Image (cartoon, rainbow, N blue to C red):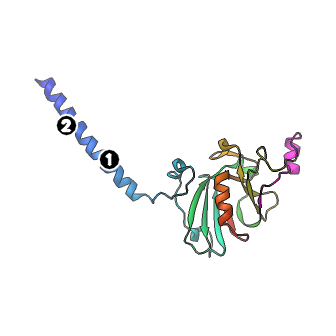
Amino acid sequence: MTRLMFSRRRLIGAAAATVFVPAAAQAQMAAQPAEVETGFARRNVSSFAAQDWRDHFSELGKGAIVADTISRALHFWSGDGTDYRIYPTSVPKSDELTRRGYTKIVRKKVGPDWTPTPSQLARFPDWKYMPPGPDNPLGTHAMYLDWPAYLIHGTHDTRKIGRRSSDGCIGLYNAAIADLFDLTPIGTQVRLI
């Protein structure tokens, strides 16, 4: 008889837990910021925390981008503040390759070609110029910053997104960079943190 009572108690406890746990999870989800719809890699978005552009810029100007190398996310705000998007990114492999601070978009190109920088050639002497195409490390679109050799660009190697895998640039899925490219005017302010 004691054994039966113990089993009933466990059953009642388990039933209470199945009712309580979903309610607790719903309350926790309600306390968190709403998930941002990007249309890209939705499974990754839940780990990105929404940011406020005012924490980084005094005004939106033509638009604003924050590339967060810790969370590996790029945040975009339109110039009028009505459009906010988050994209998963690849970030530089090391802190030595990472430049942080304020810059802006100075040029955009569909179908970029790629030339290794002198520092890349010193480390990888077999690297060579690559025209646009499926083997090009810049993917389908590139946005050039006013820092020489630093870009926000696509990648054909989707394994790089979400990782420390670039030689200094911020990389996005090709579909994501195409979306961002269309939204971002030249002169958009950028902050890498």
Amino acid type of disc 2?
A: Ile
Quadrant where the C terminus is found in the figure: bottom right
On the question of residue 122 being in view, the answer is: yes
Q: Position of residue 53 (x, y in %)?
A: 58, 68
How far separated are the C-alphas under marks 1 and 2? 16 Å
Q: Badge 2 is on which residue?
A: 12
Q: Position of residue 92 (x, y in %)?
A: 71, 49
Q: Residues within 10 Å of mark 2 (few under 14, many from 20)?
A: few
* In this picture, residue 100 sits left or right of residue 60: right
Q: What residue lies at 67% left-to-right and 45% top-to-bottom?
A: 164
Q: Badge 1 is on which residue?
A: 22
Quadrant where the N terminus is found in the figure: top left
- SS category of the residue bearing label 2: helix
- SS category of the residue bearing label 1: helix
* In this picture, residue 13 sits left or right of residue 79: left
Q: What residue lies at 85% left-to-right and 41% top-to-bottom?
A: 124
- 32 and 109: which is toward the camera: 109
The answer to whether the residue labelled 1 contacts the one labelled 2, judged by CB atoms less than 8 Å apart, is: no
Give the mark nearest the N terminus, 1 or 2: 2
Q: What residue lies at 64% left-to-right and 55% top-to-bottom?
A: 176
User: Is 143 one of the magenta-colored residues?
Assistant: no
**Corner quadrant of residue 163:** top right
| Magenta segment boundaries in residue numbering | 108-128
